Structure formats: structure tokens, C-alpha cells
Image (cartoon, rainbow, N blue to C red):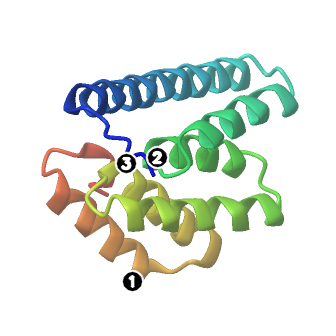
Amino acid sequence: RRSTLVSPAVHVASAASVSALSAAAAEAAEALQNLGHFWAARRRGREQPEQAFLQALALRPTSADAMLSYAVFLQTSGEAEALMEAESLLRTAVAVEPLNANCLNALAVLVEERYGSHSEAQDLYRRAIQAEPDFVSAVR
């Protein structure tokens, strides 16, 4: 049997490639989120922005920002199924990034408006302010 050894230089190059791909995916996901916001703001229907947000999530499935963008978009429909999905996305985003004030605030708004759950909303607002003391949106 012949042993194959991989040189340290190959490991370094491989790690650099993975890092570059990860950075490229992050940039592409951010661009898709921006495109989704652009289309949604221009009232381009629901399909185009939704596809952009879903593609961003496919590239970065654990990105709290991608989850937040799509959840906020879903909330605008006001449909019960979309609101359930938005809540699920926001709860996941908060689990991924417990100190993300934007995610905490968006979830607080949703639970307060959807369920009238003032105590949970207050807790989420408080956590948003603790995470980011100058976070104005959470000061209600």
C-alpha cells in the first residue's frame, strides 16, 4: 500500500479556498437580500422578492440577518401561514444570534401584534436593549 501524505501547504490552500467561498456566499446572500428588499419596496409582487430571500437563505441557512429579512417580508402579507413561518424564522434567528437586537425586536413586534403577548414582547424588547443599549426601536 502506498501512503498518500498531504502537505501542510495543501491544507492551508484548501482552508483559504473554503474561506473565500464562504465570504463569496455571504456577499451573494447579502446582495440577494438587498434585491428582495428592492423588489418588495417597488411592489413587484410577491414572487420575485420571495425568491430572492429564499435564495439568500439557501446560501446562508444559519444567517440571522437572512432569516430576519425573509421574516419581515412574510409579515407584510398578513396571512396566517406566512405569520407562522415568520415567527418560526425569527425564533430560529434569535436562537442562532441571541444578542441580535433587530431579530429580538422583530419577534417582539410579531408576538405583541399577533398574540397580544405583552409579557413576552416586553422580555424581548428588554433583551434587545440589553444587547444594544442604544437600540431605539425597542424603546416603546
Q: Quadrant of residue 38?
A: top right
Q: Which mark is residue 15?
A: none
SS for dot 1 = helix
In the drawing, does residue 130 fall left or right of residue 70?
left
Q: Amino acid at mark 2?
A: Ser
The residue that appears at 31% across and 25% down in the rendered structure is 16
Please state which of the two labelled residues, at mark 2 or mark 1, is closer to the viewer: 2
The residue that appears at 60% across and 65% down in the rendered structure is 87
Q: Amino acid at mark 1?
A: Ser
* Label 2: how many Cα within 10 Å (few below 14, some 14–19, many 20+): some
Pointers 3 and 1 in contact (CB under 8 A)?
Answer: no
Please state which of the two labelled residues, at mark 3 or mark 2, is closer to the viewer: 2
Disc 2 to disc 1, C-alpha distance:
27 Å
Percent coordinates x, y for residue 32 in the rendering:
61, 24
In the drawing, does residue 139 fall left or right of residue 53?
left
Observer-nearest of 68 and 76? 68
In the drawing, does residue 134 fall left or right of residue 26?
left
Q: Quadrant of residue 5?
A: top left
Percent coordinates x, y for residue 17 in the rendering:
39, 24
Q: Which residue is mark 2?
A: 63
Percent coordinates x, y for residue 114 in the rendering:
64, 70
The residue that appears at 42% across and 46% down in the rendered structure is 2
SS for dot 3 = helix
Name the residue at the front extreme.
Answer: 1
Q: Which residue is mark 1?
A: 119
Tag 2 or tag 3, which sits nearer the N-term? 2
Q: Which residue is mark 3?
A: 102
Q: Is residue 38 above or below residue 67?
A: above
Percent coordinates x, y for residue 113 in the rendering:
59, 66
